[in-house]
Every structure is written in C-alpha cells, then in structure tokens.
Amino acid sequence: MRESEREQFRQFVAASGGRLIRVATALTGDHHAAEDLLQGALVRTAARWGKIEGDPEAYVRRAMYHAQVTVWRRRQRLRETPTDHVPERPDHRDEIGATDRRLALRHALMRLGPRQRAVLVARYFEDLSEEQTAALLGCSPGTVRSQLHRALARLRQIAPELNETELNEESIR
C-alpha cells in the first residue's frame, strides 16, 4: 500500500469508525467481540484498499455481516450442555425503565437466528431498505420481508415484557 493510500485509509477509519463500531456491536451484542469483528473487517479492507470500487464503508459493513454470520454458523454446530440448575436472573427493575427494555431487547436479539438478527440490524439499526438489506445479505427482498416478520414475532414471544408498541424501529435502534 502506497503512503497516499495508507493516509486515505487512516482518514476513512477516523471518519467511519464510530458508525462501524456501533453496527458491529449491534451484530455481536458484545463490545469486545464487536472490536474484533471490526478489526478483522478493516484488515481485509486495508488489503484491498486500492481495488475497492464505490463506498468503502459498505464494503466494511458487508465484510462484518459475512464474518458474523460465519461465527453464528460455527456456534450452531456447538452443542450446549443442559444443567439441572438454572442460573438466577435478577427480578428487580431499576429506576431507569429504558435501560431494562434495552437489555431485554438485547437479550432477546441474541436468541434469534443469524439471518433474523442480521435482517433486524440492517433494517432497523442501519435503516437500510429491503432491497439494500437483500443485496447486503445475498437474498431476495421477499426473504428479507419474511425474515423480518418472523424475527419481530419471535422477539414478541421471547420478550413478552416488551409490548407491541415497544418493538418498533426506535426500540431496536
């Protein structure tokens, strides 16, 4: 990579880093995993920096989505070991109800399948259209619509404490 390209890449990371880490955090549900995901995507982007046509941020996002779906697929192959004891969950609510709702939503999102979660993040967190989401995930707009419908229904089932008015675009963002 030439010095001018290296400087362009540094400027790109400085300008887009905040947006990209938020997307990565939404995809992984964990800040540390998000940093790893973004770093891997940026390494792949840097290697192809001079050859990227169009929006480099879109390239990084696509790399993150693909890498995260790979992680989800690997996790599906791992088997969980059931236990006799269910860990306790705190039943109290703090004074900040919005925090509780965000945590409940994050927990519910983590229980969705990889496609459903990716569709929700792309559509509501990134505010992409159905066509943009379909192109990003490599599927048809009809698949995006059906996955979105199923994902919202599953969220309502997983997290009944979030009433229907709370499961909208604003709460997912």
Image: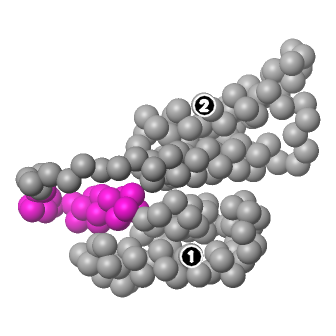
Q: Is residue 48 above or below residue 133?
A: above
Magenta residue span: 88-111
Which residue is at a point 58% across and 47% down the rendered structure image?
70
Looking at the rendered structure, the kind of residue marked 1 is Gln
The number of numbered discs placed on residues in the rendered structure image is 2
Mark nearer the N terminus (1 vs 2):
2
Residue 16, quarter of picture: top right
Of discs 1 and 2, which sits in the foreground? 1
Residue closest to the far top: 3
Which residue is at a point 40% across and 47% down the rendered structure image?
78
> Picture coordinates of residue 83 (x, y %)?
14, 52
> Picture coordinates of residue 53 (x, y %)?
91, 44
Q: Are the residues tagged 1 and 2 within 8 Å (C-beta)?
A: no
The one of 170 and 32 positioned closer to us in this rendering: 32
The one of 3 and 119 positioned closer to us in this rendering: 119
> Picture coordinates of residue 135 (x, y %)?
76, 64
- Whether residue 58 sits left or right of residue 17 in the image: it is right
Which residue is at a point 26% across and 78% down the rendered structure image?
160
Which quarter of the figure is the N terminus placed in?
A: top right
- Whether residue 86 sits left or right of residue 77 in the image: it is left
Residue 147, quarter of picture: bottom right
> Where is mark 1, residue-wise?
147
How many other residues sit within 10 Å of disc 2, few (<14), some (14-19) or many (≥20)? some
Q: Is residue 43 above or below residue 118?
A: above
Indicate whether residue 51 is drawn in magenta.
no
> Alpha carbon of mark 1 to alpha carbon of mark 2: how far?
28 Å
Q: Secondary structure at mark 2?
A: helix
The one of 106 and 72 positioned closer to us in this rendering: 72
Residue 46 visible in image? yes
Which residue is at a point 53% across and 52% down the rendered structure image?
73
Looking at the rendered structure, the kind of residue marked 2 is Gln
> Where is mark 2, residue-wise?
39
